[in-house]
Image (cartoon, rainbow, N blue to C red):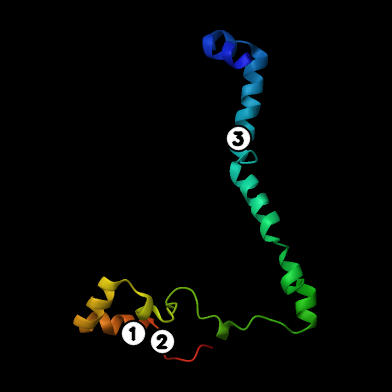
Amino acid sequence: SWQLVASAFPIAFLSNPFTYIFLRICLFLEATGLASGAWVLAAIHKKIAGFQRDEVYIGTAEERAAKKMGDNDDNLHLGTGHMVKLPGFDEHAPQSLKELFKSDASVREYLESISNHGEEQA
């Protein structure tokens, strides 16, 4: 019912000091993002998928150090300047791209350069 009063008499409703303070608190809460629907969706997805904290999967930093499980940067071929290979992309490409692949040598050469079809995966 207060929403009907507020919509019918917005100036009178907002001129009330308690309403103004309550509105400012609500706007601050909204600005923090705590009331965002994404948090609710993430919590539901976490519950359905059974996600757990990273420590469950990879251990704590202390456990990893004790087992000498440090990161080997040589195995990380990602980031700037490192293309991610597309396995078997040429077989699963759209028909129009397959036809272009057959007719244009430069397209074929480029797609073969980014595809690891026929290569051993590390």
Disc nearest the viewer among 1 and 2: 2
Residue for point 70% across, 55% down: 47
Residue picked out by circle 3:
30
Residue picked out by circle 1:
112
Residue picked out by circle 2:
117
Compute the Cα span from label 2 to label 3.
49 Å
Q: Would residue 114 be found to the left or right of residue 33 on screen?
A: left
Sequence-wise first label, 2 or 3: 3
Q: Position of residue 83 (x, y in %)?
A: 42, 77
Which corner quadrant of the image does residue 24 belong to?
top right
At numbered mark 3, what does the secondary structure look like: helix, strand or loop? helix
Residue positioned most to the front: 95
CB under 8 Å between discs 1 and 2 = yes
Compute the Cα span from label 1 to label 2.
8 Å
Sequence-wise first label, 1 or 3: 3
Q: Quadrant of the C terminus?
A: bottom right
At numbered mark 1, what does the secondary structure look like: helix, strand or loop? helix
Residue for point 63% across, 38% down: 35
Q: Amino acid at mark 3?
A: Glu
Give whichever of 41, 113 is nearer the camera. Answer: 41
Q: Amino acid at mark 2?
A: His
